Amino acid sequence: MKRMCKRFYLLLSVIFVSGLIFVFSGNALAYDGYQNPIRVYLNETSTAPSVTVKQGTYQVVNSGGTVTKTVNAGSSVTLAAGSKLSSVNGDGRFSYGSYEYRGDLTYKSGYVVNTVGLEQYLYSVVMLEIGGYAPGIEALKAQAVAARSYACLKLKTPRNAAYYDILNSTSDQVYRGCSGESEDTAVGKRVHAAVDATAGLVMYYNGALVNAIYMANAGGCTEDASNVWGGDCGYLQGIPCPWDALPFEGDAGSYKSMKMPTGYEWTVTMSFADLAAKLGYGGTITDVSVSHGGSVSDYAKTVTVTGTAGAASFSGTAFRAKLGLRSANLDIVVGKSVAAYKTLSLQYVTSSSFATTFSTSGKMIMINGRGYGHSVGMSQWSACVMAYQGKDYRYILNYFYNQDQNNNNLKIETYK
């Protein structure tokens, strides 16, 4: 028995010494427990990123997995190519560029990527996408579930499988780390509460994750995804959004005010010469026409200009992008001359800019539009009004992502 005890303690000693060798030989002790970690693209650069640790302890880990440096709060470090700044306990924060972030930072192949837990990622996204003007918590919950569903789809189908899952801009979802959370404000705390209250919940449609697209204001009616980007999707169909035109009483934590519809109706006037320049049309434009062919709303399927260089057609999406319009839910009125519309156009541009914008004589157009965004999926403005009227987040999500509600195709469940 005594011999067995001696052998046991000898074994423990070997294990302990081996552990010391492991710890001090430069092997990483990095935290790897982020719940549903998501890799967020921050930047692409050939310049080694300089990072300052704001909270907690970090380790710099090289491409071979060896710890090369320990960095405590208040200290800075420049990451070499292929390295990672890894939080030891998972509670770290660091600053990079103009913003502060939770989680880890990786610099590989020129990509600067923030790895963070999904729920923490959503604190920033929900705040930046809708938090500043959403009344009450139900619209925030709807946004949290939609944003989480979208992000989880990117986890399954990453933007760049080798390096990152999702972009930090409107190309995916706006994200600025904890700098975007406004966590010490009443609104920020309410956003945290909405994310926490729906933690893990996503939408499935017929068993598949929902591509939960959303936009600011649909202008009274959303559009079929097939008319905007091509391809059919059972849950991204055009439906009426009468709430887009209605105001609601906002509550940004410490104040309340009546919020009027943002981007519901808008008008842009432009000369044919300016239009040609923005579209890159190589001749003089003589006419413009819009086809709504099959759209549910007034979404422009095709905009065609004709002139001395022949006819040129643009999809509604491309036309919107080239002119910087709020949406492609539009129609166009052609005027006989700039002078004929001078009085009307001055309602939408300042007198000082009139001379520059309309200096070229000839025909002009008036673009009458509605909405703000791509017109597909959930209208955030309608979600706010619906919440203000007493609808809960499940009702809001079912309205926008489950057009055939009688068949109950949409399920709001924990991500799996």
Image (cartoon, rainbow, N blue to C red):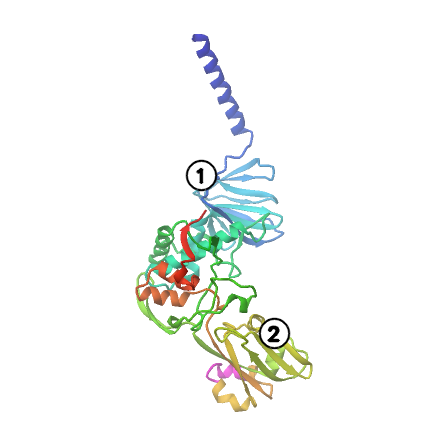
Residue 131, visible in the rendered structure: no
Please, which residue is most extreme toward the front here? 407
Q: Please state the horizontal and vertical placement of residue 214, each as a whole percent of the image.
A: 46, 63
Closer to the camera, 407 or 197?
A: 407
* Label 2: which secondary element: strand
- Inspect the image, locate mark 1, and give the three-letter code of the amino acid beneath it: Asn
> At x 51% / y 82%, what residue is drawn?
352
Looking at the rendering, in which quadrant would you find the N terminus? top left
Crowding near pointer 1: few (<14 within 10 Å), some, many (20+)?
A: some
**Residue 175 belongs to the span the image colors magenta:** no
What residue does disc 2 label?
314
User: Which mark, residue 89?
Assistant: 1
Find the magenta span and give its range.
Answer: 346-354
Q: Please state the horizontal and vertical placement of residue 209, each as a whole percent of the image.
A: 48, 54
* Label 1: which secondary element: loop
Apparent side of residue 100 relative to residue 260 in the rendered image (left or right): right
Q: Is residue 364 above or below residue 118?
A: below
Q: Is residue 179 above or below residue 15?
A: below
> At x 33% / y 60%, what residue is drawn?
392
Apparent side of residue 235 relative to residue 356 in the rendered image (left or right): left
**Residue 347 belongs to the span the image colors magenta:** yes
Closer to the camera, 183 or 98?
A: 183
Q: Please state the horizontal and vertical placement of residue 305, each as a whole percent of the image.
A: 62, 80
Q: State the separation of the CA atoms marked 2 and 1.
A: 52 Å
- Inspect the image, locate mark 2, and give the three-letter code of the amino acid beneath it: Phe
User: Which mark, residue 260?
Assistant: none
Q: Earlier in the sequence, mark 2 or mark 1?
A: 1
Mark 2 vs mark 1: give the one in front.
Answer: 2
